[in-house]
Amino acid sequence: MIVTILLGAGFLYMQYTEYCYSEFTIADSVYGNLFFSLTGLHGLHVIVGVLFLTITLIRMFLDHFTTSHHRGFEMSAYYWHLVDVVWLFLFLVVYVWAQG
């Protein structure tokens, strides 16, 4: 769980540096608009996911979960998986397909 949180935070840092050093802006072209809109919305969901996982980790350390009561852990894992799968689609559309 800690590694996943750190990887999420690392992703957000890389996205921040990519935005800072980008050679185009949201107003330059349709690609710029779509790039910043899609990756920004995904970044927002990563922020929510990292917070969700962090709260779940704290709850794990406080022994809030049992074998019959672990819905919060399950939902955080499902949410993170959704964000992960969406990134695969966005990566293909924004970085791979756009270069071709």
Image (cartoon, rainbow, N blue to C red):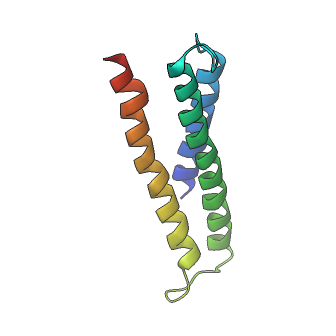
x, y (%) of residue 20? 66, 19
Residue toward you, 62 or 51: 51
x, y (%) of residue 40? 61, 35
Residue at 64 percent across and 47 percent down: it is 47
Total count of labels: 0
Quick check: can you spot residue 4? yes
Residue at 62 percent across and 67 percent down: it is 56
> Given the current orientation, which residue lies at the most extreme bottom position?
68
- Above or below residue 57? Residue 34 is above
x, y (%) of residue 90? 43, 37
x, y (%) of residue 83? 49, 51
- Above or below residue 15? Residue 66 is below
Residue toward you, 9 or 43: 43
Residue at 60 percent across and 60 percent down: it is 53
- Above or below residue 86? Residue 17 is above
Quick check: can you spot residue 10? no
